[in-house]
Amino acid sequence: MTRGRFIVFDGVEGSGKSTQMPRVARWIRDRHGEPVTTREPGGTALAEEIRRVALEDHDEPLPKTAELLLMFAARSVHLNNRIWPALQAGHWVLCDRFVDASFAYQGAGQGLPSHDIEQLETMVVGTQQPDCVFLFDLPVEVLVQRVAQRGNADRFDRAETDFHARVRTMYLERAQRRPERYAIIDATASVESMTRTICDELERRFAG
């Protein structure tokens, strides 16, 4: 059986990833069968429990290193219990966030060394990287406005502008280093335009 494709939507807050996922999932469904749509941190019942611990406020501080370890613990559960089985069964997997988020948020945002994150990436992910990462990009001033307009903000949503600027810079640096894996999406474009761009890129990369 042919292995499915692993497609990731990642990028800054308020960039429209969640709006695009069901639209692109319909495109995949029409051409490649029913896709698996999932998210990080989370994606399974156990990984969602870890997500809650990592993202919600607590009575005591959550150290930055503990936050990073929780993200990779959830990722390990997610990969082994949902993503890899789906890919091996021939399904396409469409995931909201993946490893790049750890380099952007815990690395550039929180100030943890990239070397430490790379070690965890090697341990948890190994060579099983996404086939394509769509990086949704927004100017920081637009990002801050969009985040302010939505409810249910988590700790990352409430972060300062400088934090979001560092996150965005890291995302763009990673995309520029591996253009064969990444496609940068202008998240100021219309919903329809973004969907067309993403589906055209999938067709170009994976036709047949």
Image: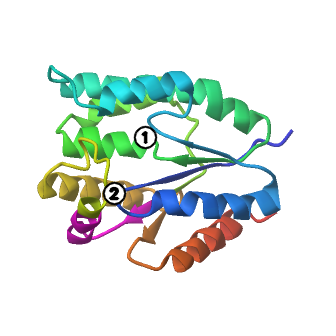
Q: Position of residue 75 (x, y in %)?
A: 48, 29
Q: Residue at x 65, y 65 (%)?
A: 202
Q: Is residue 166 above or below residue 81?
A: below
**Is 195 placed left or right of 90 in the picture?**
left
**How many other residues sit within 10 Å of disc 2, few (<14), some (14-19) or many (≥20)?**
many
For residue 3, which quarter of the picture?
A: top right
Q: Position of residue 167 (x, y in %)?
A: 25, 52
**Quadrant in the picture for the N terminus:** top right
Query: Which disc, if any, is residue 77?
Result: none
- Residue at the right extreme? 1
Mark 1, secondary structure of its residue: helix
Query: Which disc, if any, is residue 12?
Result: 2
* Magenta region, residue range: 135-146
For residue 122, which quarter of the picture?
A: top left
Colouring? rainbow
Q: Earlier in the sequence, mark 2 or mark 1?
A: 2
Is 137 covered by the magenta stretch?
Answer: yes
- Residue at the front extreme? 151
| Residue indicated by mark 1 | 99
Callout 2, which amino acid? Val
Comparing marks 2 and 1, which lies closer to the viewer?
Answer: 2
Q: Position of residue 104 (x, y in %)?
A: 30, 47
Q: Residue at x 28, y 43 (%)?
A: 154
**Is 99 placed left or right of 165 in the picture?**
right
Callout 1, which amino acid? Val
Mark 2, secondary structure of its residue: loop
